Image (tube, rainbow, N blue to C red):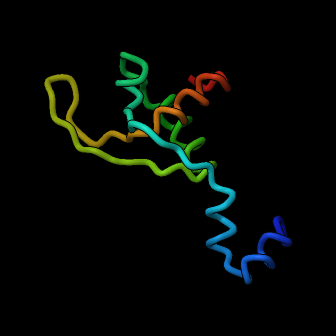
Amino acid sequence: MKNKKLYDKLGGNLEDVHMRNKKQYTGDYLSLYDYLGCAAGGALGQKIAFEATKNNINIKVKTIKNPGYEGKIQMYPEDFLIECTKKQLL
């Protein structure tokens, strides 16, 4: 098991081990549209959603209605989106 020492130290509480290894993001949550300044498209949206899920990032969902789009959008911590840019995912 990964992190066996930490797991034992925490008395076998897997949730504590998971939270200790989860990077905490702060700051504003942004949609890809807000971050990029234009529509990201489905393929890029799926790629970022996959990366967020893989890294246990909390994704917020918001429903919007405007002349250009009506539906649900996903929002990510800005620092996570910055990391995605550095990794050349965006």
Give percent across and percent down for residue 20: 66, 61
Q: Is residue 50 left or right of residue 74?
A: right
Q: Is residue 88 left or right of residue 66?
A: right
For residue 38, what is the image quadrant? top left
Q: Out of 35 and 64, give the one closest to the viewer.
A: 35
Q: Out of 82 and 70, give the one closest to the viewer.
A: 82
Q: Name the outermost residue toward the bottom.
A: 11
Residue at point 44%, 48% (across, down): 59
Give percent across and percent down for residue 65: 16, 35
Q: Is residue 27 above or below residue 56?
A: above
For residue 39, what is the image quadrant? top left
Give percent across and percent down for residue 25: 52, 44
Number of marks = 0
Q: Name the outermost residue toward the top.
A: 37
Give percent across and percent down for residue 79: 53, 33
Quadrant in the picture for the C terminus: top right
Residue at point 67%, 79% (across, down): 13
For residue 47, what is the image quadrant? top right
Q: Is residue 56 above or below residue 72?
A: below
Q: Is residue 33 above or below residue 10?
A: above
Quadrant in the picture for the N terminus: bottom right
Q: Is residue 68 left or right of residue 1?
A: left
Residue at point 38%, 33% (across, down): 30
